[in-house]
């Protein structure tokens, strides 16, 4: 536990980022991507709070290795990671974080996927908010609006709080408005964008949740009490956490709490919640186009062209968003970028895997990418990082042929263990117990050809695993 009165950064990494489809998907959402700089969004978020306690991250259990690896790469390997067995919203997520801290600790709550151009302004705002939070006031940070944005909620600033410079009482919160209402908010002058960032004392938050949502808090207490630790991971109890009603911190607590303050701040902030927002943040050419990857633009203006695979070529169009990945292409007008989530909803209704994962899928040991498939066969490129090892496993419905193209593979096949070097191959029969490892110092690249009546990833029986996936 952090010491009393310390500021404990809490990073909430539960979002899917459906409005940034086809780039953001449920197994690789936007917080794990470098969208507005050289580092990923979660790395940027963690780096903003290096002057405080090591951050605590609350995330889905399926993403624990992504979180751990990205924090390790950012030099933050000692961060605590609390794992949710299912998404229940930000109110329970903050509750379990508070239960894991000292009662007097101040929780600085941040989404993992927001952009902040002025981190020094955020640090100053947190410093200004700390005395109020220590007094038992729940503090939110209001972003000084740059225009009548319809994609954000709003908070109305009231009178200054005596003795707490920079802090103001909250008159009320407002939901995402239509255009005319947003323009009225801007004209009124008291409204700020609701950033989704908060500074709250652990005890105060839990007391308010006890008053407002006692059943939710009881479920969170039970999930923490029955949870278990494994290294840097803390697994919440699945059955107990399922009884926590899903809700956001805004609805469950902030809009109903007795003492709430807002600290207005100019951060150069964006939640990067749409491709239109990505266009606004991007570096533009002389025609106000933002282009990334293999793109050609002729007679194109005010467009976002982004390729993560095939060439994207556009001629004589304006105000468009075109995003291409190896398995999907999105085309929309920038004004309709908020509606991309409707495509995701339709794909989910159809049971399409395009909302869940890319062709290249990250794993704790490395990654794999499907390069070809057909009736009864599938070809994958597998990359195993140095020290990585797949689980000891078998398949009921498929056999596999492995060919090493770079690096050295240690192979277990039933009772035998042997090494494969570059341009060497082996066969894994259906039903054979097998494992692939990279004990070398360079990545192992391997081509896997699967044959069988069923080639889904759920045809895996694990006998041993270094990453706790049994």
Image: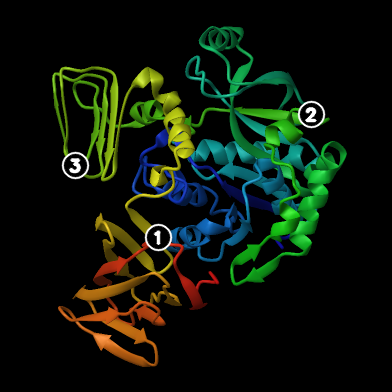
Secondary structure found at label 1: loop
Q: Earlier in the sequence, mark 1 or mark 2?
A: 2
Q: Secondary structure at mark 3?
A: loop
Crowd class of label 1 (few under 14; some 14 to 19; many from 20; radius 10 Å): few
Judge whether 423 appears above or below 146 on screen: below
Q: Which residue is mark 3?
A: 310
Q: Nearer the viewer, mark 3 or mark 2?
A: 3
Q: Give the CA separation, mark 3 to mark 2.
A: 49 Å
Question: Residue drawn 44% across and 47% down?
Answer: 356
From the top left corner, tell me how far across and down residue 469 is, in percent. 53, 69
Is residue 155 something one can see in this rendering? yes
Q: Locate residue 38 relative to residue 191 in the image: left or right.
A: left
Rendered location of residue 467, percent (x, y)? 51, 72
- Mark 2 surroundings: few (<14), some (14-19) or many (≥20) residues within 10 A: some
Residue at (50% x, 14% y) in the render: 148
Which residue: 40% across, 79% down? 431
Residue at the limit of the structure toward the right, as seen here: 211
Sequence-wise, which precedes: disc 3 or disc 2?
2
| The C terminus, quarter of image | bottom right
* Quadrant in which residue 360 is drawn: bottom left
Label 1 sits on residue: 456
CA neighbours of label 3 inside 10 A, class few (<14), some (14 to 19), many (20+): some
Q: Decide: marks 3, 1 in contact (CB < 8 A)?
A: no
Q: Residue 4, can we see it? A: no
Above or below, 219 relative to 135:
below
Q: Which residue is mark 2?
A: 256
- The CA span between labels 1 and 2 is 47 Å
* Residue 80, image quadrant: bottom right
- Horizontal arrangement in the rendering, residue 266 relative to residue 414 (left or right): right
């Amino acid at each position: 536990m952090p010491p009393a009165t310390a500021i404990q950064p809490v990073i909430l990494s539960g979002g899917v980022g459906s409005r940034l489809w086809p780039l953001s998907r449920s197994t690789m959402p936007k917080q794990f991507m470098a969208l507005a700089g050289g580092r990923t969004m979660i790395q940027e978020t963690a780096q903003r709070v290096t002057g405080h306690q090591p951050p605590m991250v609350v995330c889905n259990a399926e993403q624990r290795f992504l979180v751990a690896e990205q924090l390790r790469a950012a030099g933050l390997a000692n961060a605590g990671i609390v794992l949710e067995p299912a998404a229940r919203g930000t109110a329970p997520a903050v509750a379990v974080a508070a239960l894991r801290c000292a009662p007097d600790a101040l929780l600085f709550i941040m989404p993992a996927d927001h952009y902040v151009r002025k981190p020094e302004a955020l640090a100053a705002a947190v410093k200004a908010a700390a005395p109020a939070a220590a007094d038992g006031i729940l503090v939110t940070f209001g972003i000084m609006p740059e225009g009548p944005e319809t994609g954000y909620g709003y908070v109305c600033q009231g009178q200054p709080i005596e003795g707490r410079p920079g802090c103001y009482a909250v008159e009320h919160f407002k939901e995402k408005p239509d255009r005319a209402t947003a323009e009225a908010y801007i004209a009124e002058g008291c409204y700020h964008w609701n950033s989704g960032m908060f500074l709250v004392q652990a005890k105060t938050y839990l007391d308010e949740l006890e008053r407002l949502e006692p059943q939710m808090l009881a479920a969170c207490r039970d999930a923490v009490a029955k949870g278990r630790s494994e290294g840097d991971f803390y697994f919440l109890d699945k059955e107990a956490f399922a009884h926590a009603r899903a809700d956001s911190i805004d609805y469950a607590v902030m809009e109903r709490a007795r003492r709430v303050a807002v600290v207005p701040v100019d951060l150069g902030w964006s939640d990067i919640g749409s491709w239109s927002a990505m266009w606004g943040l991007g570096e533009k050419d002389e025609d106000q186009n933002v282009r990334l990857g293999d793109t050609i633009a002729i007679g194109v203006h005010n467009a976002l062209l982004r390729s993560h695979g095939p060439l994207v070529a556009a001629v004589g169009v304006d105000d468009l968003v075109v995003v291409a990945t190896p398995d999907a292409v999105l085309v929309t007008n920038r004004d309709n970028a908020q509606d991309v989530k409707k495509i995701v909803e339709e794909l989910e209704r159809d049971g399409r895997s395009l909302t869940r994962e890319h062709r290249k899928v990250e794993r704790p040991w490395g990654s794999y990418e499907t390069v070809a498939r057909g009736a009864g066969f599938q070809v994958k490129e597998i990359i195993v990082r140095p020290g990585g090892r797949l689980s000891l496993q078998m398949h009921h419905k498929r056999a596999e042929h492995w060919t090493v193209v770079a690096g050295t593979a240690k192979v277990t096949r039933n009772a035998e263990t042997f090494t494969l070097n570059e341009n060497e191959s082996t066969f894994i029969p259906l039903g054979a117990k097998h494992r692939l490892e990279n004990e070398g110092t360079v990545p192992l690249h391997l081509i896997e050809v699967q044959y069988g009546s069923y080639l889904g990833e759920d045809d895996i029986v694990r006998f041993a695993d270094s990453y706790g996936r049994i």
